[in-house]
Amino acid sequence: MKVIIFDFDGTIADSFAAVLRITNQLAAEFGYAPARPEDVPRLKNLSSREIVKQSKVSSFKLPFLLQRLRDELNREMHQVQPIAGMKTTLLKLKQQGYRLGIVTSNSRENVIAFLKAQDLDSIFDFVGSGLALFGKGRVIQRLLRRHHLNPEDVIYVGDETRDIEAARKIGIKVISVSWGYNSSQALAAEHPDFLIHRPEELLQVLEREELGVKS
């Protein structure tokens, strides 16, 4: 297993606070209630579909909301930091010979700005972006075809239940991380191949996979 595809927001980039703040700023414009601090634990236990359903944002408005979120986030990417311990882990994975990629519903422009600011732009082989909130599976499939990757050689790392869903649809293993947008309880309920709680655990999981050790 020599190719690792990462989600971006909440997995590599510690962008939750910025995304929450911008989402609240756009609440009146798009007709949903802003999230209060005490709402956050409950929201982390919900899937993206459940959050959209509760917000009552129409499927017509949703792409426009996502685009506005991307645009507003662009102004803040220079302030967003990596998840603690993630930069060191990424550098070690690259040194060990893994090919690294990113698939995100954020914009490619925002991802590249973040990677350049963190001196990480040279370690990723590809960045794929799709505006649809639930279209990651299609973006990953396009990348697999474009880079002639065998799904059996790929593992996906993400922080949301929709990441598990996307990986399952295309038959690749998934490592869920509990430090992002969904809680460990919500992730565990979807039965990912692995669930980890610190970036350095990625190295341990991948070493076991390379050796064929059962989890």
Image (cartoon, rainbow, N blue to C red):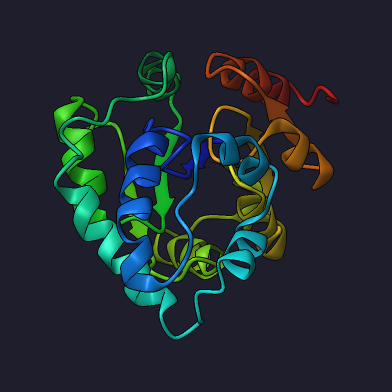
Measuring from the top left, give residue 161's x and y in whole percent: 67, 50
Measuring from the top left, give residue 112's x and y in whole percent: 20, 45
Please name the residue shown 70% across and 43% down the image. 45
Measuring from the top left, give residue 97's x and y in whole percent: 43, 26
Please name the residue shown 23% across and 35% down the image. 115
Q: Camera-side residue: 10 or 195?
A: 10
Quadrant (top left, top right, bottom left, bottom right) of the N terminus: top right
Q: Camera-side residue: 205 or 63?
A: 63
Left-right relation of 128 to 1: left
Quadrant (top left, top right, bottom left, bottom right) of the C terminus: top right
Q: Quadrant of residue 9?
A: top left
Q: Camera-side residue: 117 or 26?
A: 26
Q: Look at the picture and state if 169 lies above or below 18.
A: below
Q: Tell me how many marks there are.
A: 0
Left-right relation of 214 to 111: right
Q: Look at the picture and state if 147 lies above or below 30.
A: above
Q: Look at the picture and state if 149 lies above or below 52.
A: above
Q: Quadrant of residue 17?
A: top left
Please name the residue shown 63% across and 70% down the image. 53
Measuring from the top left, give residue 160's x and y in whole percent: 60, 46
Outermost residue toward the bottom in this view:
60
Q: Is residue 70 visible?
A: yes
Q: Is residue 1 visible?
A: no
